Image (cartoon, rainbow, N blue to C red):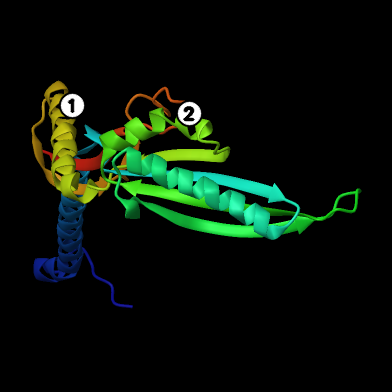
Amino acid sequence: MTQYSDDTPPQATAFWKKPIVLASAILAVGLGVGGFMTGDGLVRAKMADRTVTVRGLAERDVVADLAVWTLSYSSTAGNLAAAQASVDRDTQQLREFFADMGFPEDALQAVSVNASSYTPDDGITRFTVNQRMSLRTEDIERAQQAVRRESDLVRRGVLLQSSNMSFTFTGLNEIKPEMVAEATQDARAAAEQFALDSGADVGSIRRATQGYFSITARDGDADGWGAADSPFKKVRVVTTVDFMLD
């Protein structure tokens, strides 16, 4: 091993010290660059987190544009022909009822018909014929008038097993774009209030999710006619929007 005495030349001592100084300098630079990059990353992450998530609501009252009234009735007799004849008579009464109400003949259509038989303890076989008819119309006001006069069918001798009137709004696609825009504006208004309270400004949309559209009765499940649906509907959509904050 080489040893140096106190009288070692200064140049030799400096020579051995240089690698240590150089390594320290490299380490310091590395730490500085690394610290800058880490700090910059944290700033970027913090900037990326400067968002607010809000929900926007849009509602619209509409009137149904399609009415479907489904009626079921049946007849039981000692033979199939008699049961079918009774059902045919009821069907004719239905057609006359709707004709008197001003509906075209093709508005009333047969949905289904079936027959069955059974033999009770008395040993006499009985036959039952079940019939379902459906009125389909876009004349909502006339449909409302018809369902109000359902008792007239009883006076005509038609005993209904079930009666179901449903009103449907089919124009959803026409109002979707406007409602989505309204919901987005409502969401931005909520975001602006949040930003005002936190001393920030609302920027662009980072992400948006359109909720599903719901169509319900405007005033509840029914409109006061018992089982009858209401033609007055409420369309509703909720959107979720992430806004950037500046």
Q: Give 49 or 196, whichever is nearer the viewer.
A: 196
Q: Position of residue 92 (x, y in %)?
A: 47, 48
Label 1 secondary element = helix
Sequence-wise first label, 2 or 1: 2
Which label sits on residue 194? Answer: 1
Label 1 crowd bin: few (<14), some (14–19), many (20+), radius 10 Å: some
Residue 234 occupies quadrant = top left
Q: Residue at x 90, y 53 (%)?
A: 123
Q: Residue at x 11, y 25 (%)?
A: 199
Task: Name the residue furthest bottom.
Answer: 1
The N terminus - image quarter: bottom left
Q: Marks 2 and 1, Cα distance to the nearest angstrom?
A: 57 Å
**Image side of residue 124 versus residue 83, left or right:** right
Q: Position of residue 3 (x, y in %)?
A: 28, 72
The C terminus - image quarter: top left
Q: Give 141 or 229, whichever is nearer the viewer.
A: 141
**Residue topped by disc 2:** 151
Give the residue type that dot 1 points to.
Phe
